[in-house]
Image (tube, rainbow, N blue to C red):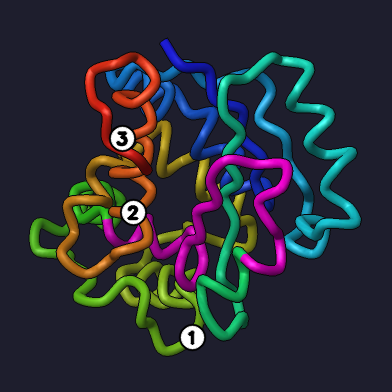
Amino acid sequence: MVRIGFVVEGDTEKIVIESAAFCAWAKSQGIEICSPVVNAEGGGNLLPQNIIPIISQIRRANPDRIVILTDLEDAPGIDAVRARIGTEHTDLIFIAVKAIEAWFLADSTALRTWLGLADAYEILPEETVGMPWDRLKELANSKGKREPGLSKPGFAKKMCEHYGFTIAGAANHHACPSVKEFHDGMVKLGRLVVGASDETI
C-alpha cells in the first residue's frame, strides 16, 4: 500500500480528496491517503518560496509520495502552473481545468442525481463560457435548485456525500482530460509502488 500525502489548493479539493468515496477508491488501487490533506488556502501559496512549510506539514505523516492538486484558473496553460510550483519538493502535480468544479460537471451520474434529470449532460466541462462554478449556478437556477448557492465547499460536500460524485465517474467523461489524467495518474502510482507494474508516471 502506497501512502500519498496531498497538498491541495483550497477547501473544495480537500473535501474531494478526503471524501469517503475517493478514499475507498484509492484503497482499491493500493493507495492510502495520508491524513490530514493539507490545504494551501490558495494557489498563490503554492509557490517555491511558500511551499516548504506546507510540505513540512505533510511530511509528518511519512508519505511515500507527495501530490499537489490545484486549479488552472487564468494561467496560460498547465505547463505554466507546473513550472510556477516546481517539483523539487513534490512527486506529482495535477491541475484541474479550469477549476475543480469542472469535475462535478463531468460526472454525469452525479449531475443527473443532483438536478433530478435523467438526461443531464455537460458536453464540454472544461470549456464553459465562464468558470465551471458559474455554469453550476446557471444549471441550478434553470432547474429551480437551491444549490450550489454561494458556498463552493458546501456544494462540494453535498456532491460527494449525497449526489454520488466520484473521480472515476468524472474520468468516464469523454471531454474532461484533467480529471482523466488525475485518475490515471493515481492508478499508475498505486501500481508502480505496489509492484504490479513497472510503468513510469
Q: Quadrant of residue 167?
A: top left
Q: Quadrant of residue 6?
A: top right
Q: Which residue is mark 1?
A: 130
Which residues, given as a range, are shown in magenta? 83-106
Under circle 3, the secondary element is: helix
Asked if residue 100 lies in the magenta stretch, the reply is yes
Q: Nearer the viewer, residue 192 or 187?
A: 192
Asked if residue 84 lies in the magenta stretch, the reply is yes
Of circles 2 and 1, the one toward us is 2
Q: Position of residue 104 (x, y in %)?
A: 37, 56
User: Marks 3 and 1, Cα distance to the nearest angstrom?
Assistant: 32 Å
Residue type at mark 3 is Lys
The answer to which of marks 3 and 2 sits earlier in the sequence is 2
User: Marks 3 and 2, Cα distance to the nearest angstrom?
Assistant: 10 Å
The answer to which of marks 3 and 1 sits earlier in the sequence is 1
Q: Is residue 201 left or right of residue 4?
A: left
